Image: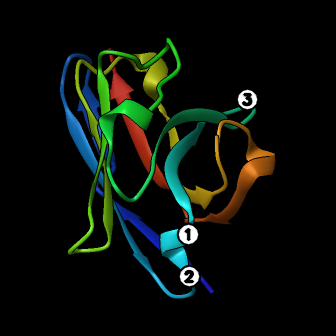
Amino acid sequence: QVQLVESGGGLVQAGDSLRLSCSVSGGSFRKYVMGWFRQAPGKAREFVSRIPWSGSSTTTFYPDSVKGRFTISTDTAKNTVYLQMNSLKPEDTAVYYCVGGVWPLQSVDLVRAWGQGTQVTVSS
């Protein structure tokens, strides 16, 4: 069974940066497309980014809400997925979940494994 463990969340001010990490193990995780979702209080889970394990930038995808500010990457030697978040805004406040699933991984029904989540809070 695939296990995903996130780290790197915290409390920051608007304009700051954070890097989330997701350590992946177990099962046949290499078959998954990896990504991040987030969930703000009272809102549905929102797709944030995706990347195949090969790390090709041509197959990454970001919604307009984070495009140009967030970057997803992988380190295949460490079995780790990263989410670099720059120019953070208060509306980025949410629990961030590392996920593994099937292409194109832009909706929750395509997710096959979830991490436990890490809280990111951005103060104004």
Q: Secondary structure at mark 1?
A: helix
**Residue 33 shows up from this direction:** yes
**Is 3 situated left or right of 1 in this image?**
left
- The local secondary structure at tag 3 comes to loop
Q: Position of residue 109 (x, y in %)?
A: 81, 48
Q: Quadrant of residue 42?
A: top right
Q: Which mark is residue 28?
A: 2
Residues under numbered marks 3 and 1 in contact, where contact means CB atoms less than 8 Å apart: no
Q: Is residue 96 visible?
A: no
Q: CA distance from mark 2 to mark 1?
A: 6 Å
Residue positioned 45% across, 25% down in the render = 92
Residue 67 horizontal side relative to residue 15, left or right: right
- Do the CB atoms of the residues marked 2 and 1 lie less than 8 Å apart? yes
Q: Write down the quadrant of residue 79 in the picture.
A: bottom left
Secondary structure of the residue carrying numbered label 2? loop
Question: Distance of mark 3 from mark 1, alpha carbons?
Answer: 30 Å
Q: Amino acid at mark 2?
A: Ser
Residue under the image location 75 percent in, 45 percent down = 108
User: In the rendered structure, which disc, 3 or 2, sits on the residue that comes first in sequence?
Assistant: 2
Q: Is residue 21 above or below residue 19?
A: below
Per the image, the residue denoted by label 1 is 31
Residue 43's disc number: 3
Q: Earlier in the sequence, mark 3 or mark 1?
A: 1
Q: Say what amino acid the circle numbered 3 marks.
A: Lys
Left of 68 or right of it: where is 66? right
Between marks 3 and 2, how big is the CA–CA gap?
A: 31 Å
Image location of residue 28, percent across then percent down: 56, 82
